Image (cartoon, rainbow, N blue to C red):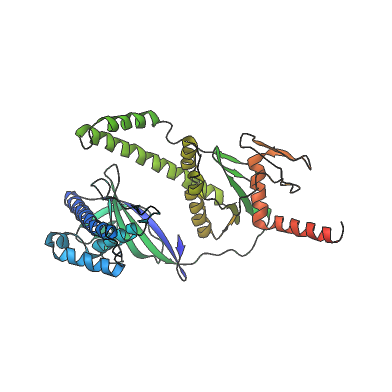
């Protein structure tokens, strides 16, 4: 959720139930968009290899219009803003490529096969709308949908239609609504603030001493995933058996994604419920996962922990509830005593208990870190340092 000059941007996903005619039209729209994407990408790749500057967004829109005018079937089947969105996707994909120090062009985007291009987008609030419990998509038709009702005074801004691995259709509608959140007016007391330490074994540990263990979402289907991966490696790419294994593997990963998403959505609700201030670490899971020497098993645990998604969901929930999310520097939160502020020299990950050599405090390391995160977010640590500085100045 983002803010936009007195408004908030939020999104709602609906399950679509098209009839045979509507589904045939949506599949045709996907195929035309995929064909246009590959055609535009081929031109951009050729320009990049020859050293020609990439097209601007304005030039990309003109190229899309030229291609659509030359293909009557595409122009008749696909709404104009959906075609413009294809040009935007190619433009954004080409922004990531460049020349390395060896003079080789790298990070070129790939062409999209049928099972890799699964969505199309109405970029403006035109081309789609709602009629009761149904959604109307331009050049596709009216179809029944199911999902959460939009907020009051919500203005639809964009709609993305997607086909998932199970063959189900979904529409994600972006709304702009007036910003009526209460806003944070001040800290009301310790019962309304909480600090959270993020981990791999215990995905969350609160400053109140609560631990939440991260489930292993792939533990059940792991054997089936490995078997399907072996089938795909042994069979010829594109053969019927290879395609069946690919589809089954996509369904398994989609189900795992839904279970993981549901778990972290519920966890984010529980972590923000009744709290005025939520303090967390400002972590970069992607950089931590890509560090040299990180074992593959640990990288998988980073994926399971899903810290980035959890932090974003807590931010959304806090904004909706009028609470405040504070992100703090995570350095030395595990090695600092939450009672006296003493910093121990080393604390290996295998040592799960924190022991302070200064005041004798002994407690769980994650709980100690969560309390330090809370204190750092509320400024207690800054007050302690300032008092210590003044004491040294007065010879105390």
Q: Quadrant of residue 325?
A: bottom right
Q: Quick one: quadrant of the C terminus?
A: bottom right
List the single residue furthest toward the right: 395
The percent coordinates of residue 379 (x first, y second) are 68, 58
321 or 158: nearer the viewer: 158
List the single residue furthest toward the front: 102
Number of numbered discs? 0
The percent coordinates of residue 103 (x first, y second) are 36, 54
Q: Is residue 43 above or below residue 250?
A: below
Q: Is residue 281 above or below residue 241?
A: below
The percent coordinates of residue 83 (x first, y second) are 24, 62
- Seen at 16% across and 52% down, the residue is 21
Q: Is residue 325 left or right of residue 87?
A: right
The percent coordinates of residue 163 (x first, y second) are 28, 48
- Visible in this render: residue 79? yes
- Visible in this render: residue 275? no
Q: Is residue 58 left or right of residue 35?
A: right
395 or 315: nearer the viewer: 395
361 or 239: nearer the viewer: 239
Q: Quick one: quadrant of the N terminus?
A: bottom left
- Seen at 68% across and 56% down, the residue is 189
217 or 6: nearer the viewer: 217
């Amino acid at each position: 959720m983002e803010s936009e000059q007195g408004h908030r941007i939020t999104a709602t996903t609906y399950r679509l139930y098209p009839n045979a005619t509507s589904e045939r039209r949506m599949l045709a729209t996907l195929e035309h968009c995929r064909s246009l994407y590959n055609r535009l990408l081929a031109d951009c790749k050729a320009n990049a290899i020859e050293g020609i500057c990439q097209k601007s967004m304005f030039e990309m829109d003109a190229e899309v219009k030229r291609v659509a005018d030359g293909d009557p079937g595409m122009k008749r089947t696909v709404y104009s803003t959906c075609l413009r969105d294809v040009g935007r996707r190619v433009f954004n994909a080409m922004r990531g490529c460049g020349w390395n120090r060896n003079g080789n062009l790298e990070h070129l985007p790939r062409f999209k096969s049928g099972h890799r291009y699964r969505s199309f987008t109405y970029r403006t609030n035109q081309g789609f709308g709602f009629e009761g419990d149904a959604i109307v998509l331009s050049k596709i038709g009216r179809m029944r949908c199911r999902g959460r009702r939009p907020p009051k005074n919500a203005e639809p801004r964009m709609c993305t239609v997607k086909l998932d691995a199970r063959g189900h259709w979904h529409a994600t509608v972006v709304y702009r609504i007036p910003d009526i959140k209460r806003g944070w007016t001040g800290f009301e007391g310790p019962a309304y603030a909480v600090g959270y330490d993020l981990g791999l074994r215990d995905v969350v540990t609160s400053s109140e001493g609560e631990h939440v263990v991260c489930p292993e979402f792939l533990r059940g289907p792991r054997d089936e995933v490995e078997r399907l991966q072996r089938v795909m490696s042994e069979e010829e790419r594109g053969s019927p058996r290879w395609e069946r294994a690919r589809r089954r593997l996509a369904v398994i990963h989609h189900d795992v994604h839904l279970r993981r998403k549901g778990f972290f959505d519920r966890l984010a609700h529980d972590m923000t419920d009744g709290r005025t201030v939520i303090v967390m670490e400002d972590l970069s899971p992607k950089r931590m996962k890509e560090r040299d020497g990180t074992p593959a098993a640990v990288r998988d645990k980073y994926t399971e922990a899903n810290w980035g998604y959890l932090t974003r969901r807590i931010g959304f929930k806090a904004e909706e509830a009028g609470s405040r999310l504070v992100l703090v520097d995570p350095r030395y939160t595990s090695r600092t005593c939450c009672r006296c502020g003493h910093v121990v020299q080393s604390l290996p990950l295998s040592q799960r208990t924190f022991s302070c050599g200064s005041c004798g405090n002994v407690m769980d390391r994650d709980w100690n870190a969560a309390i330090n995160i809370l204190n750092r977010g509320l400024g207690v640590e800054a007050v302690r340092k300032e008092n210590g500085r003044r004491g040294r100045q007065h010879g105390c």
